[in-house]
Image (cartoon, rainbow, N blue to C red):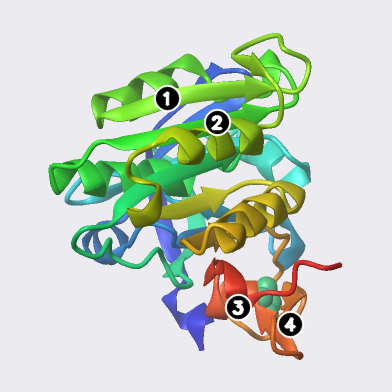
Amino acid sequence: MGLNRQHAAEIISHSFIGRGYYRLVLRAPDAARSALPGQFVMLRVSQYLDPFLARPLGIYSIPSKSSIEIVYRVAGRGTSLLTQMEPGSSLAMLGPLGRGFPAVEPGATPVLVAGGSGFPPLHFFASRLRRGGLSTPLFIGARDRAGLPPQPVLASFRKYGAKISMATEDGSAGVKCMVTSILDDYLSKSGHAASSVLYACGPRAMLAVVSRVARDRSIRCFVSMEERMACGVGACMGCSVRSGTGGFKRICTEGPVFEAGELDWSS
Ligand code: FES
């Protein structure tokens, strides 16, 4: 099925942007036209046929009508090989895949929460919110300063009107606490708490707390799950997570974006 949608995507530019992250711009007109925030692509260095070297990477932005932008951090052999690819060469690309963030409903106040390397889908989402004339609180958390997004990413979020608050567990940047603490504090003090809708991406433990904060406050919460994937198209079941009603959901096809209540956060 989806494997038929795999094609060669030429690298337009590829550069290191700090804190272990690379910025990759690919010629991909079809994806640029149709991609929604929260969707991802599977990328593989094309001369290696091993599907386990394919990496699911969230789309960071659509910089032109014919290109998509990915920001990624080296997290294994697949991304390590990817760093060596030069502009002019091609990658095997499948996508855009999965279910993205739903549109913001009239009257809702979007609030973004990013943990670790989970910012790319939220960046794409922020760019679309800006297009709609909204500016957005963005809470970013990491273990330490080195784990925060690189400066060009923070600058781009600000360009889209995001009001950034940061937290690190060791206090080396921002407030010394979990990002969920500054989120909870904001919701306690904000005059928009009742209309807030949370959009979060990051480590599962963080998403579990964000979903609990939302549940306790009876506000909606959408999470984008990060998981290792082999096929990306619903065939291998390797990305399954427990659903809130029993059974399993595949992150690659039924997600990666879920309403928090759709999932079982107990395990
Ligand atoms: Fe194969 Fe999701 S990655 S089913």
Q: Does the residue tagged 3 have its C-beta within 8 Å of any atom of ligand 1? A: no
Q: Amino acid at mark 1?
A: Ile
The tag on residue 262 is: 3
Q: CA distance from mark 1 to mark 4?
A: 38 Å
Q: Amino acid at mark 2?
A: Ile
Q: CA distance from mark 1 to mark 3?
A: 28 Å
Q: Which residue is the site of mark 2?
A: 140
Secondary structure state at the residue bearing disc 3: helix
Secondary structure state at the residue bearing disc 1: strand
Contact check, label 3 and label 2, Cβ < 8 Å: no
Q: Does the residue tagged 4 have its C-beta within 8 Å of any atom of ligand 1? A: yes
Q: Is residue 256 above or below residue 160?
A: below
Secondary structure state at the residue bearing disc 2: strand
Looking at the image, is mark 2 or mark 1 earlier in the sequence? 2
Q: How many marks?
A: 4
Looking at the image, is mark 1 or mark 3 earlier in the sequence? 1
Q: Is residue 132 above or below residue 188?
A: below
Q: Amino acid at mark 4?
A: Cys
